[in-house]
Structure formats: structure tokens, C-alpha cells
Amino acid sequence: MAKQEEMKKYVPKGEVKAYAIAALGQGLVYSCMSSYITDYYMNVLYLDAIFVILLMLFARVWDAINDPMMGMIMDRHSTKKGRMKPYPLWTAVPIAALTILMFVNPGFDTKNQSIWLYVFVSVVYVVWGMVYTASDVPFWSMPNVMTPNPKERGNLISYGKTVGGIGSAVTVALPIIVGYFVAGMDMEQANIFKYAIMAISMALIGMPLFSISSFKIKERIQIPDAKKKAPGEASTLKRIFTCKPLMLVVLSGVLSFGRYMLQAAAPHVARYSGFYLGSQAPQTVEEINKNISNVALIIQICAAIGMFGAMLFLPKLYKKFEYKHIMIVSCLGGFVSSCLTLIIGWTTKNLLICIPFMLISAIPLGVINNVSFAMVCDCLDFMEWKTGFRNTGLGSACQSFVNKIGNAFATVMIIVMYILVHIDVAQLNVGSGEAVVQAVNSMTSTQNFAMFSLVTIVPGISLLLCAIPLFFYDLTGAKKNKVFSELAQLRKERGINVEE
């Protein structure tokens, strides 16, 4: 019985493609924000570093409330169009508008900064996060209601994440390519122009693609609306926090925050790590701009290829290995490779030699992004099997929160490094061409090393920590198969329908 149910497929290829295309659109916009917001805040708007840290931390504290709220809304209320399908459509336009506002200065003076610049940045950043939550949590919860088959669900998530990774790669390449065309501008104008083009193009392309999921996806598992807690019954939050497998996945995800730094820190490393692709340090602002584009392009391409390559192989790995083993091996391999990148890169001062090691270091990006979502879905199966309740929205909100807090920790780490080694972004970006060139070329070895560590040892240590909780994750093998086979029968007894 269990074997037959497991082999049955529910989602047609056209629907899988529609889900992946929607993930592509989301990837364009999210990567736009996550990969470049710190560089824009620090090196274009010249915001105070402590302010940026506090903003990121405040936004994540609010997410700790906002994400579960969104999950509970989904669990308790279903619309005529579905429980999750409407949200990508409802949020597409607001997200597009807020993404553009995030990277386009409407007229504030960045040199003589006023309180209103900080108010504007704070409001846009926090509201963007809230609206994004209202789309992200439902979107990545959809596989839970598209099919009851865990393998099909895992492959669906993998396919969506893989195609979404293409969106991230496009976002990586676009501002760097634009950077070559603005190389002749002064540093300030070049930065302003390339980020405006990036935000506008990604928002206007990405969000229409994302909204496709509202029209093409079918919610086959009709889970009843969550009821109010009966006397003596465990609360929803208690069920979530006492689900050991889910908490281990969440803890592992938080500890893996460093994986975001390979992309988010690339522009900072390109500016200030002291790596040059020519025979000597740049002697003009134009040469500095070109070198920034070249170095950032190498790092970002390595991150994209490593991540995308891992995603392509995951469906095959799923057939032979447990999720936890795939995660552990990739994290440990990423740690070793990150250490080698630091040692070899810093001793040779040759970034090109580091390419093979950076590619391996980026593999966990694809693995963690995909596998952790599949593991959360399995944990929700386990919780439903054990308690009789399936809190799909709230459980998926945990994963959404983990991703956002990981991104915030990565951002904070970058800014903390600026503070620790005393990098003055105003001195390095503003003034005559000669002054900028002299300031960049006179950075200390400590400053250069600190910035290079942001894409080497810092994410490496994070990956090592990520692997530790997974050794205690036991929702595998016979236990997982038992949960799935018994859950199918329990759903029938509870009157939960699965449509064809």
C-alpha cells in the first residue's frame, strides 16, 4: 500500500513548469535585494554602519512575529481561490514597487544626510520584508498541498529552487555587466546608475513571472481550516516548538547564515580585498570600476555555478541518500574548501587559482536551499502523524524566517567587519579621481584580509556549525517510511481529500 501510494504522481509537467517559472521570478527579485542591499546602503547612500546593523536586526525581530502570523493566517483561513494560491498575485505589484524604491533614491542628499533619508530607508526595508513574507510563505508552502507524495514533493521543491537559482544568477550578472558600461563615470554616478537599472528591470520582469503560480497551481490536498484550541489541547506554537526534527532543521538553517555571504559579500570583497586581475593595482577610477566588476563577476559566477550545479544533481542524490547525509557531506566539504580558498588565495594573491575551491564552497548554497525545504515538509508530515494537526503555513513560516534571519546575520557580519577594520566608505568613494585611487590603494593588509575572509573562512565556519544539529536528526529510513504510510491512512480516516 505504502509503496503504491509513494509511486503515484499527482502533478503534471505543465504545472511543475509553472511553479518553476514562478520561482524564477521570485529569485530575480529576492537575489536583487539580498545580494546587493548592503553595498547599496554602505557605498551608495553612505548610511551609518551602526544604523544599518540596527535596521537589519529590528527587521528580523519583527519577522519573528510577522512570519508566524502569516503562517497562522494561512492555516486558519482559506479563500475561494485556494489557501495559498492568491497571495503571489496579491503581493506582486507592491513587491515590485518596493524593490524599486529600495534601490532608487527619490532625491535625498546622501552627503548632507537628514533624518528623512533614514526614515525612508527604514520604512521601505521593513515594509518590503512584510509584503515579501505574505508571498514567500504561501509560495513555498504550495508543494505541501500540490501532492501527498514526499518524493514528488521533494523533486518539485528541487526543481523550483533550481530554476529560481537561475534568477539569482541573472541578478548577479546584470549589475556587473552594467558596471562595464559605467566604468567611465565617477564612482558615485556609476553605483547609482547600475543599481537603479538592476532594481527596475528585475522588479518588472520578476513579479509578473511570480504571479503565474496563482493561476497554474492546483491545491490537491484540501486541509480543513485550523480550529480554535480546545481546552487542554496543545497550542499551535507548542506543537511547532516541540517537534524535535523541525527544530533541528531550523537550528541548522540559522547556523548556516554564512552561505549567503558568498553572494552578498562579493561586491565588498571586489572593492576592498586588494585582489586585482591585472599586473598592477588600478591607477585610475575607470580601472578601479572595471576591476570591481571583474572580481565580483568571478566570485558571483563561482557561487552561481556551484549552487546551480548542486541543484541539478539533487534529484539523483535523493534516490540514493538521505536528506541529512547530503546536507552533512556538502557542509563539511564546503568548510574544507573555504579554508583552502583563504590559504591559497591570500598566499598567492591570485584569485583565478581559487576558482575550483570557490566552486566547491558554493555547493552547499544549492544543497541547503533545496534540501532544508524538503526536510521541513517531512517534519510537517511527522507532526501531523504524531498530533493529528498539520500546520503547513506556520511550519513553512519557520523556514522563511530562517532564510531571512540568515540573510540578515550575513549582512550584519559584513558591516561589523567594516567597523572592526575601520573602513571609511566616504573616503574611498567620494572626491577627485586621484584621491579615490590613492585611498583604495593605501588600504592596509589587515583591511584587505578581513574583507577576503567574508567569502572564505567566515562562511566556512558557518557551514561547519550547520552540520552539527543534523547528526541528531532521525526522521530517516524506516521511521520516515512508517510515518508516510500510516499518514496516508490517517488522512482518509479524518476526511482529508486528495484530488487527482
Image: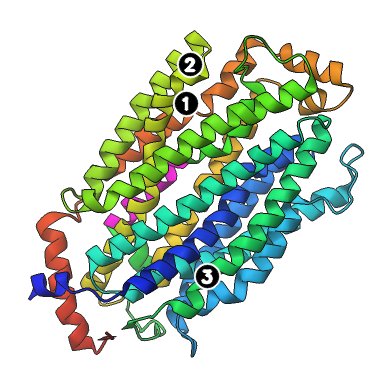
Q: Which circle, 2 or 3, is nearer the viewer? A: 2
Percent position of residue 187, x then y: 80, 30
Percent position of residue 401, x then y: 49, 56
**Quarter of the image that includes the N terminus:** bottom left
Residue 485, label in figure = none
Mark 2 Cα shell of 10 Å, populated few (<14), some (14-19), many (≥20): many
Q: Which residue is mark 1?
A: 456
Residue at the limit of the structure toward the front, as seen here: 181
How many marks do you count on the picture? 3
Q: Which residue is mark 3?
A: 69
Prevailing secondary structure of the magenta residues:
helix
Q: Are marks 2 and 1 in contact (CB under 8 Å)?
A: yes
The secondary structure type at the circle numbered 1 is loop
Mark 2 and mark 1: Cα distance apart in space: 9 Å
Mark 2 and mark 3: Cα distance apart in space: 45 Å
Relative depth, front residue between 137 and 465: 137
Percent position of residue 460, x then y: 41, 29
Relative depth, front residue between 451 and 490: 451
> Is 250 inside the magenta-drawn segment?
yes
Residue type, mark 3 in image:
Met
Residue type, mark 1 in image:
Thr
Q: Quadrant of residue 466?
A: top left
Q: Earlier in the sequence, mark 2 or mark 1?
A: 2
Q: Which residues are magenta?
A: 245-257
Q: Which residue is mark 2?
A: 345
Percent position of residue 406, x then y: 50, 46
Q: Which circle, 2 or 1, is nearer the viewer? A: 2
Q: Earlier in the sequence, mark 1 or mark 3?
A: 3
Mark 1 and mark 3: Cα distance apart in space: 36 Å
Q: Which circle, 1 or 3, is nearer the viewer? A: 1
The secondary structure type at the circle numbered 3 is helix
